[in-house]
Amino acid sequence: MVNFIKEVKEEWLNTSAEVFGKVFLELADNDKRIVFVGADTFRSSGIKEFVEKYPDRTFDVGIAEQNAIGFCAGLAFDGKKPFFSAIANFLTFRCYEQIRNDLAKPGLNVVLVSRGSGIAYAYAGPTHNTTDEIGALRVMPGITIFDPGDVADFENAIRKSIELKGPIYIRSYKALIRKINPEGYDFKFGKGVVIKEGKDIFLIASGTMVYQSFIAAQILETKGISAGVVNMHTIKPVDEELINDISSRVKKIVTVEEHSIINGLGSAVSEVLVKNCGSEQLAIGFPDEYPVNGPYEELLEFYELSGSKIAARVSNFLNK
Amino acid sequence: MLAKKDIINLMTKSHENKVTFLEIIRRCGGDTLFGGVLSSLDILTVLYNGILKHDPENPKWEDRDIFLLSGGHKAIGLYVVLQSAGYFEKDILWTYNEFKCRVPLHLDGKSLPGLEFPFGSLGHGLSVGSGIAAGFKHDNKSNRVFVLTGDGEMSEGSVWEAMLSATKYHLDNLILIIDKNNLTCDGYLDEIVPLSPLDEKARAFGWEAKIINGHDVSQIYESLSNIPYKQGKPNCIVANTIKGKGVNFAENRIDYHSWKTKSKDDLEKAAESIELCYREEIGKIG
């Protein structure tokens, strides 16, 4: 075991901010629409060179995250491609409503890059560590949620993020795993990567836990258990096709994330699995989109939440 | 200075808008935000009739000024003004609050030509407006951004965050108009949480500020015609208004923050009062 832990440590690249700064500058050199918004987060975001090179493309609004998101929305409205980076907790919870109303609802492409997600700020306590922000964001229609497994994932996500329609939340920790994805892997948002095949069980993981799961799979191999590992870097939209494929091959699936087991990757996977398991669940509620306006009773009918519509849906479900 | 005929013209337009507003309530008979719509309708009317650079034939015109109704609950007032400016057919107004209608209670932002951004939760507009204005400055464009808030909305901390950064980025192309009708849902604002003096607060935050009578079309017009007040500084207009303006039984009454009535009698009284108020004010001009 000791050896494995040592190996993991050697695999860590000590700062994701440096990686971000490098890729961001490269991207910004090629696209004049790219701007950076900070909330007293310039120094910690690794963008020193960008700030020196393009001072007029930086906006630091001070320690005011709600304003920072609204400001990003305004810049995106003008056709710019704003990036905003801050500590995960302040980037998400402090300005949650602004992300929902000002970015996700109007569908504005703003890139939110966190730092210190999960328990990366180990000593900093619950005001800074976030094991729940994916859960809060995942319910929001129109947002993409990304949890990079290694440097390549992180770089790819940053590069491709400005092609998306709405906002994207890119999770980052303090350190990044150098390499867990196979050489030359095909990167696509919403498409998981099989890191290791397995016959007995599959570990579907995201972020830092992809590497930890890989270590676990190696340990399990020594015990004669063939465990596959998937890097599910995009938590929203999750790769349903891959989850279905895996569930047709193995009887047991494990999800691993540096996040609460509520409403993170685990929940996303179970929402897919439940469609095929022994006791099938029909989830009645709102679809993943912003509700339309209208009189309450008509809305209940439209969303099939009236007694008669529920009965009809249950009948259809039984007869399926 | 506006010529007398222009003043009368603006007052008449605003009056017609109020009549249309009452007609929506009559036809739709539903629950509608009321007092705050009437406190802001004169301002909205002047904005879209001589102040904003805009083109109903080309709503996404690149050189247009941007108007953000941060108090998105007053959307019905904006729909009326946009319709009267020619952005869409009048029939659309009569579908207010119907299922999937294009004129919902809170601003959707995309449901109609002329709308720019969705608002409904208070305290968002000034940050969004600052970002838009900063983008215009960055691109050396002369477009301006007008944001209308209520005075109650000024209790939201995010507004003051935006005040700070607008000063930092010298957003003299940003104009905050505060519809200061003094009332929120619960009562008089200065009893709930004292916010006055808003002009002095704005100045202390690095803005230029003016106080006007928000029902005097001539004062509204003049205050919005000399932007920026000072090179490099954002502009704040504190518009003193009356909640429920023109409907005598609703003026300054918290019960008329929103109004749900199906009574023909009530609506007739409201229409008479609006008419009388208009005639009196025109009479004063002589």
Image (cartoon, grey):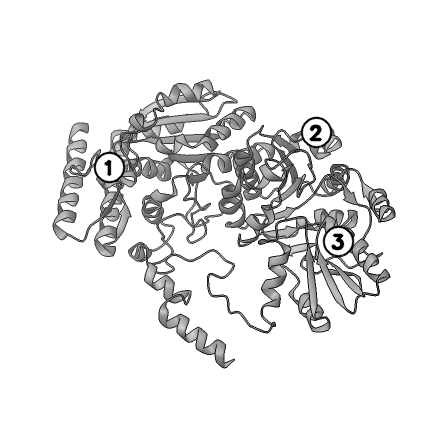
Residue highlighted by disc 2: A43
Residue highlighted by disc 1: B254
Residue B131 visible somewhere in the drawing? no
Camera-nearest residue between A258 and A138: A258
In this rendering, do the residues under marks 3 and 1 share a single chain? no
Please tell me whether residue B286 is drawn above or below residue A169 in the rendered image.
above
Tell me residue A155's x, y (percent): 75, 47
Q: Look at the numbered disc 2 and give the secondary structure of its residue.
A: helix
- Badge 2: how crowded within 10 Å, few (<14), some, or many (20+)? few
State which tag comes first along the sequence, 3 or 2: 2
Camera-nearest residue between A316 and B241: A316
- Badge 1: how crowded within 10 Å, few (<14), some, or many (20+)? some
Residue type of the residue flagged with mark 3: Val
Q: Look at the numbered disc 3 and give the secondary structure of its residue.
A: helix
Give the Cα distance between marks 3 and 1.
Answer: 57 Å
Q: Is residue A209 left or right of residue B193?
A: right
Residue, x 54% and y 51% (percent of image)?
Answer: A107
Q: How many marks?
A: 3
Q: Look at the numbered disc 1 and give the secondary structure of its residue.
A: helix
- Badge 3: how crowded within 10 Å, few (<14), some, or many (20+)? many
Q: Is residue A187 left or right of residue A10?
A: left
Tell me residue B268's x, y (percent): 13, 48
Residue type of the residue flagged with mark 1: Ile
Closer to viewer: mark 3 or mark 2: 3
Instruction: Identify the disc placed on residue A210.
Output: 3
